[in-house]
Structures are given as structure tokens and as C-alpha cells.
Image (tube, rainbow, N blue to C red):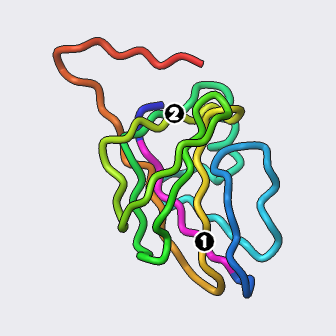
Amino acid sequence: MINGFLIDIDNENNEDVTLSFFTNEKIPNGVKLTVKNSDFDYNSLLLMAINTGFIGNGISTDDNRIFQAAIYKNGTPIFYEFSKVLNDTEIMIDGLSNYFTLTIPPSSKTLVQLVPCFPSPTVGFILTN
């Protein structure tokens, strides 16, 4: 799946919560995830991640308190610091060892997007697991 996704995150907890996006890790109590640009819910997108995967070209958020992402490639994290937008960074999500994490501030509503990665019109594009 090459299109990005847009997720509204509501952290009702009084502390930071680190979320691993599209892994089998349980969503913490007090956190609600709502997919904004799709007819699917988060669990449906998780199944898609496992079956076909996602690929993105970065992360954007509307909350400047989120300033670091860990992008896991084959289970190994690479940490990036950013301010609202992390561009030109390949992010693959397979529901297993390729995913990303963000720390969501306490008592906050945050919008997070996987920036879509579209194939070049002159270069072939194949997404595999």
C-alpha cells in the first residue's frame, strides 16, 4: 500500500505514552486512535500492514512537542529529531520488524500522518514483504 495514513491520537493519560505504529503491541489504556482518511479502523490497517505493508516518505504531526521518532528497520531503531515534519526518510511498515514509534505527550490530541511515498513515473515500483 503506497498511500499514507492520517491518525488522530487522543492520549487521556497524565504521562507520555510511546506508541509503536502498526505492530501487534497493545495500544495502552487511555489512548484512542482514529483513522481519519480511510474507511478502515486502526486494526484493519494493522492487518493490511502485515499482509501488504506500507511505505512512506516521512512523518508529520501537528504537535511540536513530538520531536523525535524511532524508525525500526529489521528491528533496529534509527532515531530522528524533527519539528512537525520528518521528510525524505523511507519508512517501511510490515507489522513485524519494520515500524516507527512516537512519544505522545500527556493529556493531548495529536494528528500523525505517514507521508505518502509515490513511485516516480519513470521508475518501476514494487512493494514486497
Task: Assess disc 2: are there few (<14), some (14-19) or many (≥20) residues with their C-alpha within 10 Å of its C-alpha.
Answer: many
SS for callout 2? strand
User: Label 2 is placed on what type of residue?
Assistant: Met
Q: Residue at x 79, y 49 (%)?
A: 25
Q: Residue at x 82, y 71 (%)?
A: 29
User: Label 1 is placed on what type of residue?
Assistant: Ile
Q: In the image, which disc is placed on residue 104? A: 1
Is the residue 17 above or below the residue 21 in the image?
Answer: below
Query: Sequence order check: which comes first, mark 1 or mark 2?
Result: 2
**The quarter of the displayed image where residue 99 is located:** top right
The percent position of residue 54, horizontal first and vertical second, equals 51, 34
Q: Is residue 37 among the parts visible in the rendering?
A: no
Q: Which residue is mark 2?
A: 92
The percent position of residue 13, horizontal first and vertical second, equals 74, 83
Task: Assess disc 1: are there few (<14), some (14-19) or many (≥20) residues with their C-alpha within 10 Å of its C-alpha.
Answer: many
Residue 9 is one of the magenta-drawn residues: yes
Residue extent of the magenta highlight: 4-11
SS for callout 1? strand
CA separation in Å, label 1 and label 2:
21 Å
Q: Is residue 73 among the parts visible in the rendering?
A: yes
**The quarter of the displayed image where residue 129 is located:** top right
Left or right of 48 in this view: 38 = left
